Image (cartoon, grey):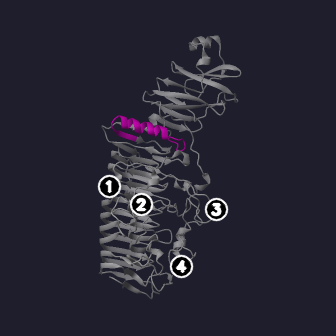
Amino acid sequence: MYERIDRKAGERLKMETGKKITLMNTPLVFPEGGERAWEGLCAFCRDGVHYLIVSGKDGKEISSSRDLRRWQEFRLLSAEDLTFCGSKDWDQRLSDCSAVWDEELALHVKYELIQNGTQIGLSVSRDLKHWQRFERDKATAPERGIIYDGDYYRALPFGEYIDKESLPEGISVFDIRDYGAIADGATLCTEPFMAAAEAARDAGGGIVLVTGGHYCVGSVWIYDNTTLWIDTDSALCASKNLSNYENALLTCMDVKNVSIRGGGKIIGNGEYFAYLPLKRPLLEPLEKTKLPPRLFDPMGYPVDTIRYAYRSRIRYAEDKYAEGLLPIERPMYTVWICGCEEVTIENVVIEGALDWTLVLDCSQKVQIRDLVINGNRHVANTDGIDIMGCRQVEIEHSFISCADDGICIKSPRRREHDGIEIKGCQTKMRGTKDIHIRDCTVVSVMNAFKIGTETYFDIEDVTLEHCTFMLPDIFPGTVSGISIESADGGYVRNIQIQDVEMSRVCCPLFICLNKRNKYGMGDDREKRACGKIENVKIERVNAQEIELPGIITGFRDTEEEKAVEGNVKDIHIQELYAVYRDNKEELHPEKTVYENVRDYPENNAFGDVPAYGLYIRHGENVTVEDCCIVPRSMNQRECFVWEESC
């Protein structure tokens, strides 16, 4: 296996045979005293010695090495050299690339002329397909990787979720170091990883082992019957160079019986794929709570609103601040489980997401436990866990800290621009169903738990229990604790939430039906004027230091020839206890609360509502029992307000 010692001295290779050699990072320059232009190259290995022959304007020269690092000075070929090499016809064998098999190392070693023939690059391979070139990762934009105080949640309790565990016995192990991976966090190891992953696949399955340090990779995949085992104190680190990606960092697509575990980390380095924020994280609370009158501007202007307070601190990959910047391309996801069955993710940390962190897409029978997501809480779109078009998903005892939605359940129409065919995704798994979440803690800037917004197909049979939502160290608080939305025609039903603790969550509860219809009506689902939200039961919620009232609303659309009303139905709220943070508030209520029929639904997009506890409208059979909300001392609004058809 490969074992790193000193970067300047080279990388030590310790093979199964016990032989130790040393490799320097590419490129290798011969001789050390200067440069010369070579036009061709060939190599061979004899009696444990590597020989290099190069040709140039001064003739043909030869050098040799036993350890692939220390080489004899190049000298002109002699008659004895030609006899020893076994051929005088070197002009026919010289090329810009030459590979030899090293019997003792059980590796192919390849030499390449680079930089106009002034340097020689060295790479190794076991399968003649994946070559480890020992290239250093180069950030596309190194100036973006700045971390500010408040970006990451410092008090994350890793020890409560992550354990050191031992490799199981009796399973074939494919150590990425055996394929050329270097554990310095900077040498690109994509090819060694893929060589190990494909070797496991070809063997019918096994363990792809990441151990001994940090390994830098671009996009990589794992296959059927494979466990990706990242050992404690080891990590897969995402390349900071966009050219090393194809969609996600780690992908499992259309495979069965896969797992990710081991106690180590997957590090995304997401800061490198977004612009720096307009403002640094807000570490002190706002003196007053103020909302924009409605969502007339996505940034939340004017600048003294709580929406602007968090929006202005987000790192976007587009020109949100109107500075004339071009959009930044970024990798799609950090970990993508797509079209898979029987997946287990446990005892692992995903840190610094590239975009969405963990995506469960058109998959079934997925179990997640003892997962820690430690995200930069100001990198845009870095949701914690996204569940789309899935069945039979269980998430338990996990800690999620992220910038966007913590746990988000969606049911989108397959995005044509993805250009990806997922077996059976649209025919077998149009909706999202049978999702169970328990004993999780979410630290989120946006929505701690959310159903929606993408809801083209149905979402049903969801339970969430014994969870904690909070944002203890940056301001303002989490946008909402529980958010249930249907905006694109899908039916959201049979939702049960119970025993939730919230702290510093601005809005404890937001339920909203509208008809944004992001995907249009479509021809792969019966035509619906709008979706539904029905049969929702929420009980035993304790929320401390809230700043905004809860909202439960359908819509009334008066722009149609005949007014259309969409009601939420059978919503039962029981034992909701909430206490306001006793700061100041500035209210600017409109005569009629904004309907928000076609815009993006969000609790702070309606302007000020006439209640401080719950504002409810366009509802059918909505009940509120044994609920108590303690307002600010300066409050002048009613606790509960029902309007229209409730």
Q: In the depicted view, which residue is nearer to us: 630 or 525?
A: 525
Label 4 vs label 3: CA separation?
33 Å
Dot 4 or dot 2: first in sequence order is 4
Dot 1 or dot 4: first in sequence order is 4
Tell me: 573 left or right of 591.
Answer: left
The residue that label 3 is drawn on is 324
Label 2 vs label 1: CA separation?
26 Å
Marks 1, 4: nearer the viewer: 1
Residue 553 picture quarter: bottom left
Label 2: element kind: strand
- Where does the image place residue 204, in percent across and percent down from the top left? 33, 36
Amino acid bearing label 1:
Met
Up-down: is 159 above or below 187?
A: below
Q: Considering the image in quadrants, where does the C terminus appear?
A: bottom left
Label 3 vs label 2: CA separation?
34 Å
The residue that label 1 is drawn on is 429
Q: In the depicted view, which residue is nearer to us: 561 or 564?
A: 561
Dot 2 or dot 1: first in sequence order is 2
Marks 2, 1: nearer the viewer: 1
The residue that label 4 is drawn on is 287
Label 1: element kind: loop
Report crowding for label 3: few under 14, some 14 to 19, many 20 or more residues within 10 A (C-alpha).
Answer: few
Please report the residue visible at 51 percent of the width from the left and 21 percent of the height from the top: 48
